[in-house]
Amino acid sequence: MESIQSLLQNAAKATRAIKLLSDADKKAVLSALARQLRLNKDLIIAENANDLVAMSDEDPKKDRLVLNAERIEDLAKSVEDIAELEDPSAQVLSEKTLANGLFVQKKTVALGVVGVIYESRPNVTVDVAALCIRSGNVCVLRGGTDALYSNRCLVAILQGVLEEYGFDQNIVQLLPADRKYISELLTATKYVDIIIPRGSQQLINYVRENAKVPVIETGAGVCHTYVESTANLANAAEIVTNAKVTRPSVCNALDTVLADASIAEELLGLLSPKLQAFNVEIFADEKAYSYLEKLNYPFLQKATEEDFGREFLDFKCSVKVLDGLEEALDHIALFSSKHSEAIVSEDAESIERFLNEVDAAAVYANASTRFTDGGVFGLGAEIGISTQKLHARGPFALEKLVTEKWVVKGSGQVR
């Protein structure tokens, strides 16, 4: 294939086809998709195995690639949940009749063709397609080569459901995984309405720098947890451990622990056995290194400047000892990717300052950053976590897959 232009043209044409689908049609398609995911579980697992065998067991991204029976069931349930959410398109936002008799209405409409570029996560294929169908959008998917077999299988199931109901299969399309087509997608202003990159900072930077189509950034997360001097340290150790080890390869996982100097030694004494149980490699600043060295922590490295502001996506984290809230706020402002940030504290004033002053899509007091997720927040599945400020911020889910349109009705008025 020399060009994907014909695929993009078909996607643009399909925006008219999806507008013909009723609310009941969309729900029926999504319910059928959930059934087909369950019925084709063994096929999906077999195709996913072809992807898994090509990736090293040592690669932290491998966990994101896995589709097992439990995760397929979770996908099916997520699709069913999306089907039950209210369609965000065609909602009337305001209406009025002007003095000259013109009826002016503002309503929500689908974005159109949504292009998503992502890496190593085949569940994104289903999540994005379901969200786009529910909101009346067409999706053009460009998954990574790591998940090629899985994505092909899932899109075949999706398109099979659309065909079964007599709907245009181009409502959901999977582009070739070859990187040479990315540039064509990023510059297809005639056919694609928005591009959403989901993945590494390298991917996001490439898309931002090369796209002519409008971009909403999602994915990269450099997440901090600041343990303040008044914190319940037992709780802090549990929160930090959860944020780091439950799924270290995802964007809401913890990357840096910031410890107040007054409690740092005691905190690390509680935290070190918990992290050691998961073989977490710690990159520690001078003070933290001295404390952890006394504890004979086995996976210990001296931190460099590059270890702060680094998204590890692995059983690794950095630790820095700071003097007070002001230093913590300064550090986060310098190194945060504006994804998710947390404070552990019993001081109400410190908590309020942190929540108000930290510039991030999600801020937490006394809780793990791992909760930043569209499903957890009651939004259904998500396309990703937006770290920018225009159009969408935080979980980029169903409610944000629309824009606005003005509808004006008259009876011959002229200006």
Image (cartoon, rainbow, N blue to C red):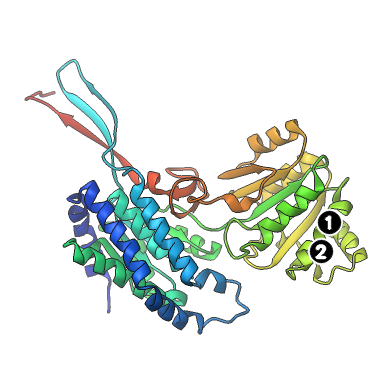
Q: In the figure, residue 1 lies in which quadrant?
A: bottom left
- One can see residue 213 in this view: no
Residue kind at label 2, given as amino acid type = Pro
Q: Nearer the viewer, residue 23 or 129?
A: 23
- Residue at position x 42%, y 81% from top? 46
- Residue at position x 34%, y 71% from top? 39
Q: Nearer the viewer, residue 24 or 65?
A: 24
Q: Which residue in the protein does label 2 denote? A: 273
- One can see residue 379 in this view: yes
- Residue at position x 81%, y 48% from top? 233
In terms of secondary structure, where does tag 1 sit? helix
| Residue 285 place in picture, x, y as percent | 82, 59
Total tally of numbered discs in the picture: 2
- Residue at position x 44%, y 74% from top? 147
Q: Residues within 10 Å of mark 2 (few under 14, many from 20)?
A: some
In terms of secondary structure, where does tag 2 sit? helix
Q: Is residue 104 above or below residue 25?
A: above
Q: Nearer the viewer, residue 10 or 316?
A: 316
Q: Which residue in the protein does label 1 denote? A: 270
Residue kind at label 1, given as amino acid type = Leu
Q: Residues within 10 Å of mark 1 (few under 14, many from 20)?
A: some
